[in-house]
Image (cartoon, rainbow, N blue to C red):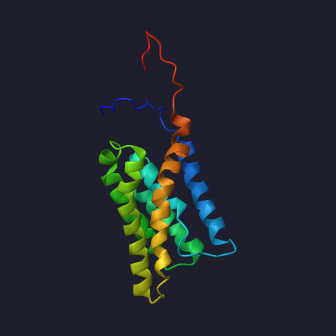
Amino acid sequence: MIMRPGQQLLLPANPVFIWSSLIGALLINILMNMGLLGRAAWTPDLLVVTLVFWSVHQPLRIGVGTAFFFGLVMDVQQGALLGQHALAYTVLGYFAVFMHRRLLWFDVPTQAVQVLPLFFAVHALELLVRLIAGDGFPGWSHLLAPVIEAVLWPVASVLLLAPQRRAPDPDDNRPL
């Protein structure tokens, strides 16, 4: 792949770091669900942000199967309809892998705008499955979660790419 001018060359991603970041996002989701507010409709799903990030940056390692597994784990943890999160996360994983080449050509703030419809689609699919199953509408504050997730995209990019960044010390013999 041809790199954009000024784009930094990254080291290969460590699989242990990838999986530990996914498990860490899952644990943060669990802690947010056990908080004083419970599962408020506006709280962002950090596991969704992490899954999209790694599906875009490492599509050969993290994809639809991983998204399905973590979706089932979230279904069991939240006591939700079995398959609700699994379906939404699987669709999310597919579209993240589908758009990964195009998305990486943009800078990080533009990427956040590009993944916003993906986050809206995931939450709409979860809401649709809930409504079909007979659950009530969680309120219009449910629309804040995808916006917060898109705002967290640059933070996730900085944190999750930090171990891969090279120290910039170019010289005349080694320009990279």
Residue 147: image location, x then y, percent: 45, 64
Q: In the rendered view, would you say 11 is above or below 40?
A: above
Asked if residue 175 lies left or right of residue 26, the reply is: left
Q: Quadrant of the C terminus?
A: top left
Residue visible at 43% across and 10% down in the picture:
172
Q: Position of residue 33 (x, y in %)?
A: 63, 71
In depth, the one of 154 and 82 nearer the eye is 154
Q: Name which residue lies at 54% across and 60% down.
A: 46
| Quadrant in the picture for residue 64 | bottom left
Residue 174 horizontal/vertical position (percent) = 44, 14
Q: Is residue 66 left or right of residue 35?
A: left
Point 45% across, 65% down: residue: 146
User: Which residue is nearer to you in this view: 19 or 164?
Assistant: 164
Above or below, 12 against 158 in this view is above
Q: Position of residue 32 (x, y in %)?
A: 63, 67
Which image quarter is the N terminus in? top left
Whether residue 50 is visible to the viewer of this picture, yes or no, is: no
The quarter of the displayed image where residue 133 is located = bottom left
| Left or right side of 47 for 111 | left
Q: Residue at x 51, y 24 (%)?
A: 168
